[in-house]
Image (cartoon, grey):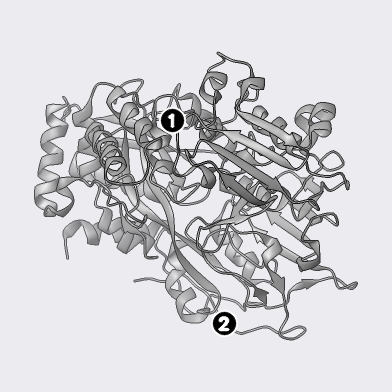
């Protein structure tokens, strides 16, 4: 065993990131579902942080997406295997040149006030999603549509977007170039419709209870900030007859330990995450409830390319990346099946082999020696160490990886990195603006199963490019690949883009995502998927017996 493995794990046990419990300090895992006296079935989710917005054209982050999947429904949604499934549109036609898409809306699709969902509603909403006045963080996902880029850049009016209502139930979308993944982008919340009269009347508050009008399986009942969001069934939803859960509750619980405790006490049916230190115990004691799901996502550390110390210092950026021992992080700290990341694109997207760092298979000694060499060539030394700040959001794995990375950088390089915590909404604003960030926590869950969902994030024109990375070589290769039919030419362009990013090192890939949920056994219909997209309308709550509980105990492991 290498010296750092011993030191790092001992340190992390002491500070509580790995765990030092015993089977005597757990407690019973209650299996009592929330079914009200009138038979109302309630699904209770742990949901990480408080969503900053529930406007589908302004929201960002997984917690917001989880709620939006239940409130709104786009033309299509994703299925259990990331496949495209008809939703508000029951069918569609694609022209031979793949530039025109015609969607046929369901005749029985209705808003929660009983009004029909129309093609005009989608025209209004797609125009709104690219309108620079709205400032959608995902506006670029609509880039394939005619005039979208010019509208986003405030060069054309939103009314010029290539969308048209051919009749109340037929929507036409025209693309500027063939885009192989276009249908998949329409499952993203930024493509969801919003109810035009509500937006016009209530402006930014159209998402609030009493104002919200939605077209998904559920609609808004209550929203108590930092307490819970409550949804109720939409009686006008086109598939309401097959909806089984009557009420949905989302609880913003930043701390994974607190969330798991609430789950064990019977207050939640589903957790947003689990503490890494409990994974071994969950596998042993709750094997039917613990789910480890390889997910189309990457965890990385972002480096602010717009200001010192990382601006114009590629050697320093690479030194920090090479100094990280990803095997220790994934195998000894996370311990949930996560894979070390040496590329941007995860390795399990069909028909794409990602570009990886050549040094990923080097010995630790060789890798660390090169990291120190680059660090010194960048102008840093024991007498003149790098001093930087690492910014991360409350809750989740950002704190864990920051503490571990800072310890590795200190040992290998002598760098002094200070972790700084911010509440989620403040963190997102800080990362987006980049005024005072240096190193920051980054994570990206793919919006659809295609390499472009990762490559597009680091285009210089994308608002989600928090590293402020700006490379014309990268931009050109990524943009061309997004409009090239699937095949060898497109793969070559994507490889060029990915290789350029790895060379320039605006981010430090750390691991490929695995999502960990515990789900009560009485929740029926759950099937893990690589996009981590779930719709409560597909679930049911079927209790095994009133008042049933187990004596299983879940505790931290000391391994």
Q: Is residue 142 above or below residue 526?
A: above
Query: Residue visible at 71% across and 71% down?
Result: 540
Residue, far front: 96
Does any portion of residue 423 appear in the rendered image?
no
397 lies left or right of 44: left
At a point 45% along the width and 45% down the height, the residue shown is 444
Of residues 51 and 148, the one drawn nearer to the viewer in this rendering: 148
Q: Can you say whether 537 is above or below 398 in the image?
A: below
State the residue position of label 1: 466
Residue 35 pos. (x, y %): 81, 72
**Circle 1: is it few (<14), some (14-19), or many (20+) Cα within 10 Å?**
many
Task: Judge whether residue 118 can be spotted in this image.
Answer: yes
Q: Quadrant of residue 9?
A: bottom left
Instruction: Judge whether 553 appears above or below 503 on screen.
Output: below
Quadrant of the image for the C terminus?
bottom left
Where on the picture, by quarter, is residue 12? bottom left
Expressed as whole percent of the image width and height from the top left, the position of residue 32 reads 73, 77
Q: Which image quadrant is residue 13 in?
A: bottom left
Task: Give percent across and percent down for residue 492.
Answer: 25, 41
Q: Nearer the viewer, residue 332 or 410?
A: 332
> Which element type, helix, strand or loop, lies under badge 1?
loop
Query: Residues under labels 1 and 2: Cα distance?
Result: 43 Å
- Mark 2 lies on a secondary structure that is loop
Of the 4 image quadrants, the one containing the N terminus is bottom left
Single out the mark in the foreground, 1 or 2. 1
* Residue 376 image point, x, y percent: 13, 30
User: Observer-nearest residue: 77 or 428?
Assistant: 77
Numbered tag placed on residue 552 in the rendering: 2
- Counting residues from the N terminus, which is met first, the one under dot 1 or under dot 2? 1
């Amino acid at each position: 065993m290498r010296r750092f493995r011993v030191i790092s794990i001992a340190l992390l046990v002491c500070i509580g990131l790995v765990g030092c419990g015993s089977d005597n300090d757990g407690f019973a895992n209650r299996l009592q579902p929330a079914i009200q006296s009138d038979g109302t079935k309630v699904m209770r989710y742990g949901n990480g942080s408080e969503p900053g917005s529930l406007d589908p054209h302004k929201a960002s982050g997984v917690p917001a997406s989880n709620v939006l999947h239940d409130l709104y429904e786009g033309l299509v949604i994703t299925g259990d295997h990331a496949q495209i499934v008809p939703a508000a549109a029951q069918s569609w036609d694609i022209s031979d040149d793949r530039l025109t898409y015609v969607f046929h809306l369901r005749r029985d699709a209705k808003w929660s006030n009983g009004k029909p969902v129309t093609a005009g509603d989608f025209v209004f909403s797609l125009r709104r999603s690219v309108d620079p006045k709205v400032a959608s963080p995902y506006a670029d996902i609509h880039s394939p549509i005619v005039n979208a880029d010019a509208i986003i850049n405030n060069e054309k009016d939103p009314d010029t977007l290539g969308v048209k209502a051919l009749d109340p139930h037929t929507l036409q979308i025209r693309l500027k170039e063939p885009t192989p993944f276009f249908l998949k982008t329409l499952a993203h919340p930024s493509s969801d419709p919003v109810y035009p009269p509500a937006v016009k009347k209530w402006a930014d508050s159209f998402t609030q209870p009493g104002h919200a009008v939605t077209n998904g399986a559920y609609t808004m009942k209550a929203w108590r900030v930092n307490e819970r969001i409550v949804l109720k069934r939409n009686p006008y939803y086109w598939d309401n007859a097959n909806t089984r859960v009557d009420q949905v509750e989302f609880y913003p619980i930043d701390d994974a330990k607190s969330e798991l405790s609430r789950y064990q006490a019977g207050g939640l049916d589903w957790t947003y995450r689990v503490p890494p230190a409990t994974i071994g115990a969950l596998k042993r004691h709750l094997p039917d409830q613990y789910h480890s799901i390889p997910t189309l996502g990457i965890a990385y550390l972002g480096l602010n390319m717009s200001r010192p110390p990382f601006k114009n210092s590629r050697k320093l950026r690479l030194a920090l990346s090479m100094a990280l021992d990803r095997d220790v992080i994934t195998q000894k700290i996370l311990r949930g099946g996560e894979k070390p990341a040496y590329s941007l694109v995860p390795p399990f997207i069909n028909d794409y082999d990602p570009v990886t760092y050549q040094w990923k298979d080097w010995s630790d000694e060789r890798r660390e020696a090169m990291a120190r060499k680059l660090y010194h060539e960048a102008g840093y030394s024991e007498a003149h160490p790098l001093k930087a700040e690492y910014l991360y959001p409350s809750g989740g794995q950002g704190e864990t990886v920051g503490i571990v990375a800072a310890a590795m950088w200190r040992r290998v390089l002598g760098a002094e990195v200070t972790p700084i915590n911010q509440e989620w909404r403040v963190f997102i604003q800080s990362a987006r603006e980049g005024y005072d960030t240096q190193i920051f926590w980054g994570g990206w869950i793919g919006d659809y199963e295609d390499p472009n969902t990762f490559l597009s994030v680091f285009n210089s024109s994308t608002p989600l490019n928090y590293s402020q990375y700006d490379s014309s070589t990268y931009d050109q290769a990524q943009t061309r690949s997004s409009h090239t039919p699937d095949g060898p030419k497109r793969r070559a362009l994507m490889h060029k883009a990915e290789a350029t990013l790895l060379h320039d090192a605006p981010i430090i890939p750390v691991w490929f995502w695995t999502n960990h949920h515990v789900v009560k056994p009485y929740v029926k219909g759950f099937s893990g998927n690589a996009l981590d997209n779930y719709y409560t309308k597909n679930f049911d709550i079927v209790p095994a017996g009133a008042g049933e509980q187990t004596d299983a105990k879940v505790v931290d492991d000391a391994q």
